[in-house]
Image: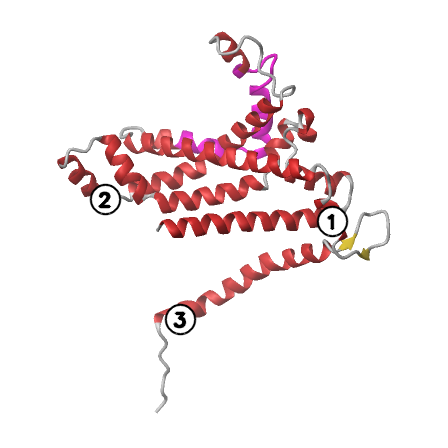
Amino acid sequence: MRRTRQISNASYGMLLSIPGLVLLLAWVLLPLIYVIGLSFYRYDNMSPVVFAGFDNYKRVLSNPDFPRILQRTFVFSFGSTGLTLVTSVLLAACLGRIGKGSALFRSLVVMPWAVPLILSGFLWAWMFHPSFGPISDLLMRSGIRKTALNIYEDPISSMLGVIIADAWRRIPFLTIITLAAFQAILEELYDAARVDGADSIDSFIHITLPLSSRPIMIGTLITLMFTFRSIDVIYSMTPGGGYTKSTYVIGTYLFDSLYEFLNFGVAAAISVILVLLTFIIGSVFIYYTLQKR
């Protein structure tokens, strides 16, 4: 009599996941290993390719502009992520209260997501244009500014402009995640809170936000990691880093090393540094999130 071997559901699930895990590891690890290997070579399209050890990393880290590039990267990344988070939570709270026509409003919120990043940069460059841009005109007509807002001749305005443009493109993603988290909360909890005398603001602060914090934090982490390596909007709005290099971030540094100077070794070193920084930020974020649980 032939005996059949039984396996548990967990083991069966793990067995089915193996091909996907192998494909995922190959998809992620092979390019990463290649870039790491390339970062140890002098590969500048001018001289013979030779092993250079850590010379490319020393060249990047000893660049006198690198601390300022890093600082601008953090300002841009956290500024865009913060603006995206606040706007997404407010939008999700509003969308959750709309009954009739909610599908239309949700479609409108998602529309910026369909616009390519580089195209949204050109769109916002026109919006912020000091001569014919509607934002500058609106600010002067409302009396907030006496002169035209010029993101091309003011470092703070330049950074603020690219942060707003980048956040506009990322808000739909986080809004959808936040709205889904809000709608997953049981209505009975709000009914009980109303019986206890809680108003809408109390329910939002003490029920909605705490119970939806995990998906919001995950969405925020993904947004933060994407903004950290973002370049599309920045490059299309302020080519070359803008006025006094005020928007020259690490992604622009990588882009110039790769396409302008054709220094593939240095570009690979910058890529590895960028991956490490993103990994560290993500790890700290996840650790903080788990600690809060």
Q: Quadrant of residue 103?
A: top left
- Residue 186 lies in what quarter of the image? top left
Query: What is the count of numbered marks?
Result: 3
Residue beneath the point at 50% across and 52% down:
283
Disc 1 residue type? Answer: Lys
Q: CA distance from mark 3 to mark 1?
A: 48 Å
| Amino acid, disc 2 | Leu
User: In the rendered structure, which amino acid carries the disc numbered 3?
Assistant: Tyr
C-alpha separation, residue under disc 2 versus residue under disc 3: 33 Å
Q: In the rendered image, which quarter contains the N terminus?
A: bottom left
- Please name the residue that numbered disc 3 is placed on: 12
Image x and y of residue 136, in percent: 54, 14
> Residue 58 shows which numbered tag?
1
Q: Secondary structure at mark 2?
A: loop
Residue 198 x %, y %: 19, 33
Contact (Cβ within 8 Å) of mark 2 with mark 3: no
Left of 102 or right of it: where is 289? right
**Disc 3 crowd, CA 10 A, few/some/many (<14, 14-19, 20+):** few
Q: Which residue is mark 2?
A: 186
Q: Looking at the image, which is closer to me, 162 or 243?
A: 243
Q: Which residues are magenta?
A: 107-135
| Residue shown at the point (46%, 65%) measured from the top left | 17
Is 121 in the magenta?
yes
Mark 3 or mark 1: name the one nearer the start of the chain. 3
